[in-house]
Image: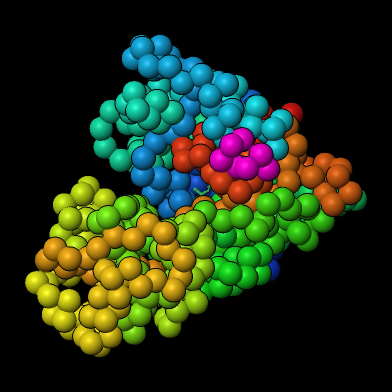
Amino acid sequence: MIKKTLVLLTVVLLTFSLIGCTGTGSKDVNTDVLVIGGGGAGLVAAIEAASNGAKVILVEKMAAVGGNTIISATGITASDTVLHTQAGIPFTKADHFKRTMDSSKNLANAELVDILVNSSSDAIDWLIELGVELKVRSEAEPFWIVPVEGHYGAQLVGAFVKEAQKHQNLEIRTNTKALELITKDGAVVGAKVDNKGEVYNINAKAVIMATGGLNNNPEMIAQYNAKYANIHTEMTTPGATGDGIIMGLTVNADLVDMEYFQVRPLSSNGNWYHERIVTTEDVSGIVVNINGERFTNETAAPRTLAAEILKQPEATGYIIFDSRVLATPDGKKAFGLGKGVQADSIEELAALINIDAEVLKKTVEDYNNGIDPFGRTVLGKIIEGPYVAVKTLPSNHYTMGGLKVNANAQVIDKNNKPIAGLYAAGEVMGGLYGDGRVAGNNTLDDIVFGKIAGANAAK
Ligand code: ADP
């Protein structure tokens, strides 16, 4: 009888708890570390926290991990690495530090840059350990560490995922979006998440924000830098919508360098084209609007050129150049990837891009005759057919500002105090780039600050 009652009681309790789960939609869980975002920084942070013994849940709002890290095309920047020694090509920590600070116009946080630079050789050792085959790109570009073959970002994310899978205390939940942070007595203690409409809480001892940048949120970009209103979003994956900044602000996080974005004025179909196709002396081209008119000095700084194109109808431009630019590697790239069109005369070219032929003809003639109301001092000539047009949709490439962090990757609040329980790594954090980014420092940031955040969150 007692046994029967116990069984009945157990069944009732089990049923009750199941109803509790499904009936309220609640599947709240507890973990040690919650990582928000499954790009490079989030995966590294999760691996590091799990390696330090913490129970880790990583949530990724998209159907798959990877973020913008997976579309990183070239490689990583690192200094004084084993690969430099092997190749006999030097790129020192001092070079790396200077290059980073100079690019930032000395606006980067020197303490964070110092950590980044000093950890870069360890980061390369770790990637080699994970099986990523790398080499120094060339004597001319000794800062670039690139894959021996294949696509960099895909190999990087592949290696991180493989490593993450080795940890039984690390669970990745895709299609799971962090909606808001949960706080208790001023500390961050988890997040409310949404998995395909099912909303629940993940309670954690620490949260690592690794949500990437704002590249896919033009309204938010314009909020921080009005001249980039209308910016196109071709160079990003969809998940980069600034969620980490928005969530950070709700817990009084401070932000740094939010007005700086890396933009590409000459860009289409997710690619960008070197500005030299419109800036090289003698042979270079021009940018016209959809009415066939020039409107700016194409040799201005890339950000200025981008802002000027964005002011034009449909925030669109056409790059016009001749066969001499087409013969250069940059010209070929723009023509090929930008799905350019070519014709033997400017009038025929105009017809191909639906622009008034007379207007485009006059624009090109004026330019060839040195008539330039925009203050351009380096004028080329568009005189040798075939003539080429490539559409450009200026695009945001990298979010340089973000959550303010200290050397422990703790997020800092507006009173300059660390927010208990909240860490950040990767593109969502600010401080490493100021006004200009050294290409390749970004996935280094994912690894270095991902590891710092992961280790500290696991403590
Ligand atoms: P990083 O290089 O800093 O890792 P990525 O762009 O590679 O940046 O990765 C950021 C990831 O965070 C993307 O996969 C993105 O989809 C994800 N993400 C962004 N916001 C959220 C959110 N609210 N909840 C869960 N994942 C998010």
Quarter of the image for residue 338 reads: bottom left
In-front residue for pair 147/22: 147
Q: Is residue 12 visible?
A: no
Colour mapping: rainbow
What residue is at 32 percent from the left and 26 percent from the top? 138
What residue is at 41 percent from the left and 40 percent from the top? 157
In-front residue for pair 271/128: 271
Is 130 rendered above or below residue 429?
A: above
Give how far across and how far down residue 411 sits, in percent: 75, 44
Is 448 rendered above or below residue 355?
A: above
Quarter of the image for residue 259 reads: bottom right
Instruction: Count all numbered tags in the image, as a single digit.
Output: 0
Quarter of the image for residue 367 reads: bottom left
Give how far across and how far down residue 46 sits, in percent: 58, 37
Please say whether residue 393 is one of the residues in the magenta stretch. no
The answer to whether residue 345 is left or right of residue 127 is left
The answer to whether residue 236 is left or right of residue 283 is right
The answer to whether residue 121 is left or right of residue 349 is right
Q: Is residue 212 visible?
A: yes
Is 142 rendered above or below residue 72?
A: above
Please say whether residue 106 is one of the residues in the magenta stretch. yes
Give how far across and how far down residue 192 sits, in percent: 69, 59
What residue is at 28 percent from the left and 85 percent from the top? 359
Q: Which range is magenta?
A: 101-107
The quarter of the rendered structure image containing the C terminus is top right
Give how far across and how far down residue 58 sits, in percent: 57, 46
What residue is at 34 percent from the left and 84 percent from the top? 291
